[in-house]
Every structure is written in C-alpha cells, then in structure tokens.
C-alpha cells in the first residue's frame, strides 16, 4: 500500500508538471523517465543500505549544526 501511494504521488507530480507546462509537445519524456529512474535509485540507495543511511545522518547533523549556529 505504501508503494502504491508513492507511485500515485509521483504520477500526480508528473501530471501537474504536464498540466502547467507552456509547451506540452516539447516535453522530452525520455529525459523525464531517465531522471525519475535515477531519482528512485538514489532514494533506494540512501534508504536501503547502511552507507546511505550514514550519509543521510551526516547531512541531518550538518543541517542541525547550521540551525543551532543561526
């Protein structure tokens, strides 16, 4: 169910992008597909592996430090 909701959200954002586009016929769908797959692979790597979770924890700690300094 969680995966289906994520796929639905992705489709909604793609549809909104198409809907608000000034040049709908100029959309290069192959580029959109390649970047979507790349985004999914990066998200999978950052959530499924220990090294990915370490990167996310490090980034969160860095942003937390920036907030505490500000």
Image (cartoon, rainbow, N blue to C red):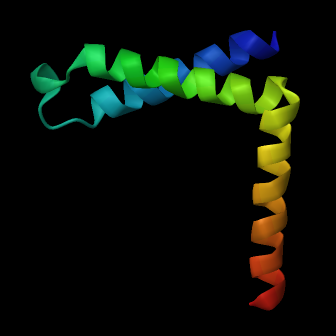
Viewer-nearest residue: 29 or 45: 45
Q: Quadrant of residue 43?
A: top right
Please give the name of the residue rendered at 79% of the width and 89% of the height, measured from the top-left corner: 69
Above or below, 60 relative to 43:
below
- Asked whether, in this view, residue 21 is left or right of residue 57, the answer is left
Please indicate whether residue 45 sits to the left or right of residue 10 in the image: right
Kindly indicate the quadrant of the structure image that contains residue 17. Answer: top left
Q: Is residue 11 above or below residue 69?
A: above
Residue 23 vertical position relative to residue 25 in the rendered view, above or below: below
The residue nearer to you, when weighing 24 against 65, is 65
Residue 52 vs residue 8, the one in the foreground: 52
Count numbered badges in the picture: 0
Residue 31, image x, y percentages: 29, 21
Residue 7 is situated, as x and y percent measured from the top left of the image, at 62, 15
Name the quadrant of the N terminus: top right
Residue at the outermost front position: 51
Q: Is residue 9 visible?
A: no
Residue 49 pos. (x, y %):
83, 26
Image position of 67 (left or right of 30) = right
What is the quadrant of the C terminus in the image?
bottom right
Is 35 placed above or below 61 here? above
Residue 29 sits in quarter: top left
Q: Is residue 20 left or right of residue 60?
A: left
Residue 46 image offset from top left, x and y in percent: 74, 33
Instruction: Residue at 11% x, 20% y: name it.
Output: 25
Q: Residue at x 15, y 38 (%)?
A: 22
**Is residue 50 something that shows in the picture?**
yes
């Amino acid at each position: 169910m969680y995966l289906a909701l994520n796929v639905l959200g992705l489709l909604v954002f793609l549809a909104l992008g198409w809907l608000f586009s000034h040049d709908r016929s100029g959309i290069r769908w192959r580029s959109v597909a390649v970047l979507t797959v790349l985004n999914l692979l990066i998200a999978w790597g950052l959530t499924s592996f220990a090294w990915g979770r370490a990167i996310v924890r490090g980034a969160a700690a860095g942003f937390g430090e920036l907030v505490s300094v500000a």
